[in-house]
Amino acid sequence: MSLLGALAITGSGMAAESERLTAVASNIANANSVASSSGAPYRAREVVFKAVPVNSDIDGQSAVGMAGVQVAGIVESAEPTRSVYDPSSNYADANGYVTMPNVNPVEEMVNMISAQQDYQANLEAFNVAKSLALRTLAI
Amino acid sequence: MIGAIDTGLEFYRQVLELRGYRQEILSADIANASTPKFKAVDLDFKEALNAVSSGGSSSSGPSSSLWLVDDPRHQNPAGSGSPAAVAAAVKYQIGNPVTLDGNSVDLNHEKVAAGENAVQYEAVAAFTSQTIRMLTVAINGSGTQQSSGA
């Protein structure tokens, strides 16, 4: 039943892409968060994917070339934080500078478009596999 | 002999299974379009079909776990399209641009290939339906009764 495997694979792709989209939303929303709950300024988060084999066979073996996708982890960006001169702020240091998050809005927008396109591609592949499976039932 | 009846259907079954397998591989490529270091693969359909239908599969090994085939007189479900038989036909795609994180999936190419493969699958499914209808007509004298009843 290879087509059911295709459904599982594209499903894993959609789940992973939506998690990536969640990270982008979090970064954009916190682009100006001076202090997070930990006290330090917010740092941009990035989702890392990895390929995992899927078992779609009757005998539980995973066939060659078939891999779903999974979120391997979420890493914080190592970019340097911005410093903004604002002596009146409560978070200003001795020199009057406030440390701002290292979120790069341009990068986030590009990431968002990329995640959206990948999600749509997965959805299309899912629909194709579904219609093929239904067509097979109608033989 | 039942073999005379189901010969064509057996071939269609193999083709459908391989087309489904290729669809699965292309889906895996699409799902991993953003996975670092993932390299796109594809099924060489011609080679896979040759491997499955040239009878090499009947001699090589256990084909299905659904029933036991441990005697040469047992009927082997020929081909069986088991991934092991066609594993050699799964190849890395060559010539794709590779991104900085080592991913070689070309999303446009994957979409086109998946669409083409879906059309081929539909075609074979239609051929299969026609063949079954034809056989039903041959058996009953009228295919419509049987197919509408079932």
Image: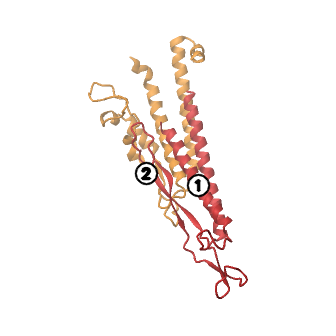
Q: Chain of mark 2?
A: B
The kind of residue tagged 1 is: Glu
Question: Residue B83's quadrant in the figure?
Answer: top left
Q: Chain of mark 1?
A: A
> Which chain is depicted red?
A
Q: Which mark is residue B91?
A: 2
Q: Which mark is residue A46?
A: none
Side (left or right) of B27 relative to A28: left
Label 2 CA crowd tier, 10 Å (few <14, some 14–19, many 20+): some
Secondary structure under tag 1 reads helix
Side (left or right) of B75 relative to B14: left
On screen, residue B13 above or below A22: above
Label 1 CA crowd tier, 10 Å (few <14, some 14–19, many 20+): many
Instruction: Give the alpha-carbon distance from disc 2 to disc 1, as whole Å.
Output: 26 Å
**Residue pointed to by mark 1:** A17
| Residue at 44 percent of width and 43 percent of height | A55
Side (left or right) of A20 relative to B70: right
On screen, residue A22 above or below B100: above
> Which chain is depicted orange?
B
Where the N terminus of chain B falls, by quadrant?
top left
Where the C terminus of chain B falls, by quadrant?
top right
